[in-house]
Image (tube, coloured by chain):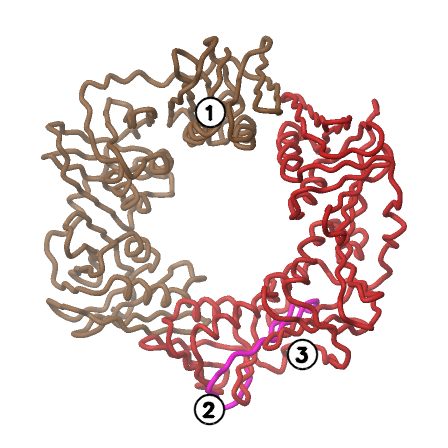
Chain colours: A brown, B red
Amino acid sequence: MNFTCDKTNLQEAISIAQKAVTGKSTMPILQGLLLNARGNKLTINSSDIDLGIETKCNANIKEEGSIVVDSKLFGDIIRKLPNSEIQIKSISEGTIEITCQRSRFTLVHMKADEFPQLPYIDEDEIISIPQKLIKNMIRSTIFAIAIDETRPILTGILFEIKNRTLNLVALDGFRLALKKETIDTEQEFSAVIPGKTLHEVVKILEDEGDVDITFTTNHILFNLGETKVVSRLLEGEFIKYQAIIPEEHELSISVNRASLLNSIERASLVSKDASSNLIKFNISEDNIVITSNSQLGDVREEVSIKLLKGNELQIAFNSKYLIDALKIMEEETITLQFTSAVSPCIIKNIENDNVIYLVLPVRISNS
Amino acid sequence: MNFTCDKTNLQEAISIAQKAVTGKSTMPILQGLLLNARGNKLTINSSDIDLGIETKCNANIKEEGSIVVDSKLFGDIIRKLPNSEIQIKSISEGTIEITCQRSRFTLVHMKADEFPQLPYIDEDEIISIPQKLIKNMIRSTIFAIAIDETRPILTGILFEIKNRTLNLVALDGFRLALKKETIDTEQEFSAVIPGKTLHEVVKILEDEGDVDITFTTNHILFNLGETKVVSRLLEGEFIKYQAIIPEEHELSISVNRASLLNSIERASLVSKDASSNLIKFNISEDNIVITSNSQLGDVREEVSIKLLKGNELQIAFNSKYLIDALKIMEEETITLQFTSAVSPCIIKNIENDNVIYLVLPVRISNS
């Protein structure tokens, strides 16, 4: 192997590929990056078994070849080199030389043939989606996945395509997040993608351009042109989430999102150390009065209601679940819908009817 | 107690006072801030025994009084309140009420009389120094204090005033940092101030205005006007550092600081995991050739020498000590002075003769 390439391009490609190197694998080869010099491109592969990334950068290839280098050390060296042309070449069995201006490194490397291949995926039926849109959809739902591994299927996000609509759904038994967008496809599909791989995918997605998505029985492929990201799917049936979302409600209120969020955040300060994060809502004609207390003290917050339809209600929540949802929403005014003190609360945007957050209340003795 | 004050002013004062709340004390009262409302000022005190801070903010005091509130909870509440007027008043024995717009908190508090007093310091003989200057002097030396507590005196910085010069000196047995500045005082003094309190002091010092410094037998007072910081001094005799700094040298070279730093940082990458961080310098007429190696690979870096006086030399260092010093220096060109492969290396600025870094070499078998 022998090639030259621009430091900045190489550094960007390494940075993308490193997203799949978790540092938690027991297989030493997975701490590495596969460098494959062929044609006029250097291809870099990385894998943590669940997630595989392949990305390319332009290179002037004098001699083709493949090696595996330690991801961290190789990445650190390239990052620290001057912004100039870098030459990388094999100098002996198991050793490469990296030269850039007046710096010269020799590094031991691993063999390429032990590196796991990216699964072959036939890109016959792709779904093209703007990268910014899918990034926003993932960010709007990923906070609601289950951390607890007791039901592995809930540690992922459901990608469901039907009737020209893409739905992303995450739920953890206490709250649910649903984001939907219209997309241009005839396909119908349903798959659950691990949350931990989507955490990396959102870092790679950009604000411009489309991503081509392909589903197979076991994998999803995000093709961004020079970069391909392949994630394993989670096995099993997702919860029938439509059955959880109530279709009707007894009480609906519109409030300023920032005011409500600030009041809840303040109210949660005194109950923070208690495991429940319990806050109480007392919803009347004009105001939500939010209260909370612990041995440290108590708090009372008032938030104006812009529009109320229905009857007064007292209901209690774990403040964390409300804060997570309100923080990720963007609209100025939002709607909250309630049925009773023991039924879920629904949080929606006023303008865009493309997001539903559901939060279960906490039963309290005096409600 | 009953007063009103502006949220922003109060938040700034809390933020300064919190620098002395370490969260590591076993005395619950030291997790608190002493609020003392008197005249037209709210005074906030904090203490971790070694370090005490007192700071004031304007307040409209309706009823004077003193209480101790939990530093973290009180600080979080004030930070989260709207930018508006805040009222704080005692509502019963052991409880205060905080109100701001439509938020109302009641908090339990501790008693003021248990809070440690700031030691009284007679400010008869002050030394006035620009805050920016002393901040820079502390930052230029603090990295060289000993982390290891086996010789407690070395965990502090020596403040030495003689002949109208303030010297700050830190050393840990492997390297030494000395920064000196001319100051306008007749006083002569020498005291060692704990590094951990100086880490907080540099965060409080600003870029404008003077700080009035007073030394007593056991304390140093930094008076910034509305804020006073008092630190205990370390007991014992500091090392006679002048005896360590060689007055003569056999070899002197001038190099570009950034080039040398970048090369050393790159060279240290391959030896990073080894405990020694060993890098070797081969100094010849035109270049320093820096090499390092480990089982991961090896590296060779060349740095141009601008001016060399003396003979060629091979010498080895722990790269960390050189990097720490070179990173904090600001001038473009610096001078390195050597005597032999087993004698300390001196690093100096070219223009400002106000800083000396000394680094001990590592003995290697083939030198």
Secondary structure under the numbered disc 1 in the rendered image: strand
Q: Secondary structure at mark 3?
A: loop
Disc 2 to disc 1, how far (Cα)? Answer: 68 Å
Q: Is residue B59 magenta?
A: yes
Left or right of B237 on screen, residue B233: left
Distance, label 3 to label 1, CA atoms, is 62 Å
Q: Nearer the viewer, mark 2 or mark 1?
A: 1
How many numbered circles are shown?
A: 3
Quickly name the residue at label 2. Answer: B62
Is residue A195 found left or right of B121 in the rendered image?
Answer: left
Residue B338 at what x, y percent from top left? 83, 37
Chain bearing tag 1 is A
Q: Which residue is mark 1?
A: A6
Magenta segment boundaries in residue numbering:
B45-66
Please state the chain letter of the residue tagged with numbered disc 3 in the rendered image. Answer: B
Horizontal and vertical percent for residue B191? 80, 65
Which residue is the site of mark 3? B117
Q: Is residue B123 left or right of residue A176?
A: right
Q: Residue B224's spot in the image, x, y percent?
A: 63, 73
At x 76% / y 43%, what residue is drawn? B347
- Which secondary structure dominates the residues rendered in magenta? strand
